[in-house]
Image: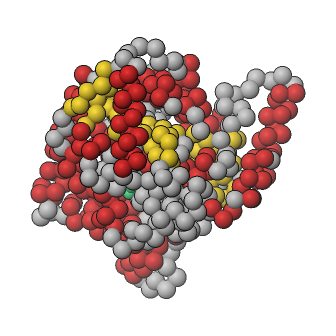
Amino acid sequence: LHYLNRIDENKHLNVFLDVYREEALLKAKQIDHKIQTNKPLGKLYGLVIGIKDVLVLKDHKARAGSKILEGFESQFTGTAVQRLLNEDALIIGMQNCDEFAMGSTNENSAFGPTLNAADNSRVPGGSSGASAVSVQAGLCMAALGTDTGGSVRQPAAFCGVVGLKPTYSRVSRYGLIAYASSFDCIGIFSNNIEDNALILSVIAGADDNDSTVSGETVPDYSQHLSFKRKAKVAYIRETIQGESLQVEIKEKTIAKLDFLKKEGHQVEEVDFQHLDYLLATYYILTTAEASSNLSRFDGVKYGFRAPEAYNLESMYKLSRSQGFGEEVKRRIMLGTFVLSASYFDAYYTKAQKVRRIIQDETRKILSEYDFIILPTTPTTAFPLNSHTENPAEMYLADVFTVQANVSGIPAISIPNGVDNNNMPIGLQIMTDVFKESELFAFSKYLM
Ligand code: GLN
């Protein structure tokens, strides 16, 4: 009830597209009953959690922040969400996001922008912006988002909460509306490391419905949260010295590195030659995958169909033209272009090769060091409507987050103080694949 009231009081933030009021109250009653009658309780009982509108829940609307899914209700529940339910978590509602998870501000949603709770004139980040705000504003305890190029970590940084992107393949993507399948990861927002670790233990692991999920055993991450040894930490000079880096972020990141040195950890600068190629690689490959994934929204199978269509072709054209927003159309066109016969080798194949080099170089650093530390974002949250004119400028702001997605490694954003306007700053820690346990423990040590 507390959280339902909080949601009502904070409607102006535009966090929830649907609140599952009756179901939440019913579930709370059932759990109460279990407690009264000494029945066994799930690991997540008492946890009130929200989910991003790209994760499907049976018999509930899923829109991916888009008009094109108007009227669509899912016939099944995705794996991660089902695992939350199995452990008695209480799912309180569906949260706004950028359309098909494309964006960095939540302004690309067909359902209006979500506002940052620290300053309502600023964006919460994106694409899982509303999920970050839900935790920031205390509308629920945790939230599931998705991170394809930073969409959990960047809004976590902008809102001052913890945001984890696990190893690619750690969590099943079954029931996640795809943006770029070889990058998409379900991630977790929380106020602290403990909740994040516990939730990952529940949602991670093999799944018959997604053949890309790893069968690697899932430890109980919440039981391994003390970090006692000395760490080897790397940082890439350009990521903490760049000219476009906001000065308070630079100072706060360097301060953390200095703290680590003082505590006796080994902190060293390393070379990474490929920073300039990260964004191009990410945007070529993700738009290519998106153009293919989004071809299923054709006015036939799901949701919206343009009423004035007069034949098959006009139905496709009108439904897609009217159903998709500007940014999604831009990316479908870009992706179709890089996949077109005459440009395929010049862009797509080249980008795949560069992806491999980035992956190899990143993992080479992580074979010598435990962690790479860098800021999550070059600036704190921007004002609303500040990037509508120039989408390419917006893409540049993803420079620190996409490396983890291109490489498939886990990464986390933890709060690292505020800037002169009291806007939250995020610190990002990356580590090698399947080392989430160490990542959690080290993050807790740093918080
Ligand atoms: N901002 C990035 C993009 O627009 C990240 C998106 C994401 O991770 N879903 O593609």
Seen from the viewer's position, the closer of residues 368 and 359 is: 368
Residue 253 found in image quarter: top left
Residue 304: x and y in percent read 52, 71
In the picture shown, does residue 324 fall above or below 115? below
Look at 36% across and 74% down and name the residue there: 389
Left or right of residue 363: residue 389? right
In the picture shown, does residue 381 fall above or below 218? below
Seen from the viewer's position, the closer of residues 192 and 30 is: 192
Look at 32% across and 51% down and name the residue there: 245
In the picture shown, does residue 247 fall above or below 203? below
- Residue 72 can be seen in this image: no
Look at 50% across and 47% down and name the residue there: 418
Left or right of residue 145: residue 14? right
Look at 44% across and 53% down and name the residue there: 380
Seen from the viewer's position, the closer of residues 390 and 218 is: 390
Q: In the image, ligand 1 is in what quadrant?
A: bottom left
Instruction: Please count the marks in the image.
Output: 0
Residue 38: x and y in percent read 84, 22
In the picture shown, does residue 305 fall above or below 276? below
The chosen color scheme is secondary structure
Residue 131: x and y in percent read 56, 50
Residue 426 found in image quarter: top left
Q: Residue furthest top?
A: 229
- Residue 41 can be seen in this image: yes
Residue 150: x and y in percent read 40, 48
Residue 359 found in image quarter: top left
Q: Residue furthest right?
A: 36
